[in-house]
Structure formats: C-alpha cells, structure tokens
Image: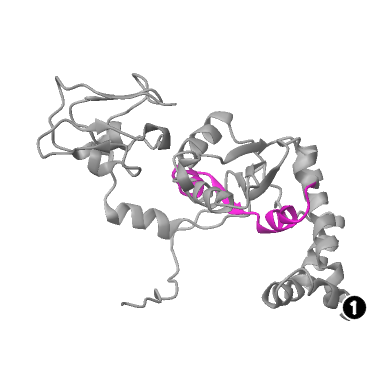
Amino acid sequence: MVEITVDESVCKRDGLCAMACVRGILEQKERGGVPEVVRRETCIDCGHCVAICPSGAISHSSFPEGSVGSVNAASMPTYEQVLELIRSRRSKRAFRDAPVEREVIEQMLEAARFAPSGHNAQGTMFAVIQDRDRLHEIGSLTGESLRKLVKPFRSPVGRAFMRLMLDARQIETIAGYAPELVYLSDLYDEGMDVFLRNAPALVLFHAEDNGGMAVIDASLALQNATLAAEALGLGCFYTGFVVMACMRDQRIAEFLSLPAGHKIFGALAIGYPRLSYKKWPERKPARVTWL
C-alpha cells in the first residue's frame, strides 16, 4: 500500500490536493484545515496531489525525491504552435536508407509514455524492431494473416458461418476489404513492401489483452509518438494492416516473444523521410452538435 503524508509545518491549507485527488484520498474536512489522508488503498498513483501542491507538503511513496519535475512555463507552446504541428504532420511512407538512432527513438517513446491511460494503468509497452530480417518476417506474417482473415468472407458459406461470430457491420467491413487485402498480400509476395514501406524501424504498442482500455491507451500513446516523431524530424505512418493482422492472429506477437497474454494494439513504421511537405491541405469541417 502506498504511503501518503501531509507535512503540517509547510502545508498552506489551501485544499488544492483534495480538489485535485480523483479518488477522494485527501480530504479537507474544514476550510483552512490540513487535508487528511483517507482510503489510501484506492490510490492509482496519478501524482495529482504532488503535482498541485505549491509548497511540497505532500509526500507520496510512489514519487520519491527527484521524481517530480517542475513545469517550464517558458517552454510551453502556444495554441497556434500546437495546431501548426498537428496540421503539418503527415503520414510519410518514403524513407531514406538510413537507420534511426536509438537515442532518437527513445525521445519519441518518452513522449509516448506520458500519454494518459485508463485508471492510470500505464500498461502500454513498446517493442522496437530494427533488424531487417525480423521486419521482413513481420511483413510476411502480416500477409499470411490477412489472407487467413478474409478467406471465410470470400464465399457465401463462409460468410454465413462468420455471422455466428461477428455482427453485420464487422462482416460488411471485412468483406469490403477482402479484395484489397488479398491484392496487397500478393504484392508483398512479389517483393513490394506494401505493409512497412521499407521503413528502417517499426514500433509496436502492446499490452495485456484485458478486454478493457488497452486499445485506447495504446492509441493515445501512439498519437503522442507521432507528434514527437514530427518534432524530431522523423517520418512515420500507422501500419494499420499489421495491426489488423494482429487483432485475430498472435503469430507476430509470438514471433517477437512478447509477454504471454499481450496483444499488439498499435504500430508505427518510422524512419527519416525522403519527402518534405511545405503545405497542409484542408480537412473536412468539424461536424459538431451543440447541445
């Protein structure tokens, strides 16, 4: 169980920690009083209490000295700068024949690990593949898995059987993809890397398949990674076909010896881009319902 204490000698009695605590572990029972620690067994180690306290009165066993940083207000980007980064980021599939340094990938993953996660589980893990033979095998396994995925949907009998396992929308979606997936798998077998585009590195976002928030957590981490990659001068794209293959086939996870019970929920092919975009095209207007 975590240990949380409040140093009365430096506490400003402002109640900020109690307001910030998402689990109600810190309570200010009377205005101007020192917050009390209750229900500590429900703490999810979010760190809100130590982050909000202006005087450093909160001690938390999950955040020892040196593990809480100060916000550098001077480095905070403006809204316009954030929006420019988001608008200018593009999926890039043409890479230079050059490896990505480990230090650069680590910087990208530093951004990824700070993504929010359900219940602050922080369960998303990362597998970085740079070995060319392993990358090729992942492409081959992707093609094989996609063929296996769509095979039942290519006949009336197969589609009737799949109706026992999937809803109508899932069947319609996969059946619509079937010709393209078979075509791409054939192209890969002919020597065209349509799945990874000869990227020098692939980052897989994996976690325990608990049927809960894992896929959302991985997606949030992946989005952080794409923006960090753009800022680092990297190109990347979401390898949706690899993820599609992994959702119902564990062979890639087993090939990479990922932890038992883990599933791959996201994947980014990364490298130094051969193309540099100087413009960004408009998107569809936001479709908003104001209630």
Q: Indicate whether residue 240 is drawn in magenta.
A: yes
Counting from the top left corner in percent of width and height, residue 196 is at 70, 51
Specify how the rendered protein is coloured. one colour
Instruction: Please say if 115 is above or below 6.
Output: below
Which residue is denoted by mark 1 in the rendering? 157
Q: Indicate whether residue 244 is drawn in magenta.
A: yes
Q: How many marks?
A: 1
Residue 73: in sight, yes or no? no
Compared across the picture, whether 51 is left or right of 46 comes to left
What is the three-letter code of the residue carrying label 1?
Val
Magenta highlight range:
225-250
Q: Secondary structure at mark 1?
A: helix
- Outermost residue toward the bottom? 156
Q: Residue at x 24, y 39 (%)?
A: 18
Q: Nearer the viewer, residue 222 or 289?
A: 289
Compared across the picture, whether 125 is left or right of 129 comes to left
Compared across the picture, whether 246 is left or right of 29 comes to right
In the picture, which quadrant includes the N terminus? top left
In the picture, which quadrant includes the C terminus? bottom left
Compared across the picture, whether 230 is left or right of 38 comes to right
Q: Nearer the viewer, residue 33 or 213?
A: 33
Counting from the top left corner in percent of width and height, residue 205 is at 61, 44
Q: Residue at x 59, y 53 (%)?
A: 237
Q: Residue at x 14, y 19 (%)?
A: 9
Residue 130: image quadrant is top right
Instruction: Please say if 258 is above or below 57.
Output: below
Counting from the top left corner in percent of width and height, residue 138 is at 77, 46
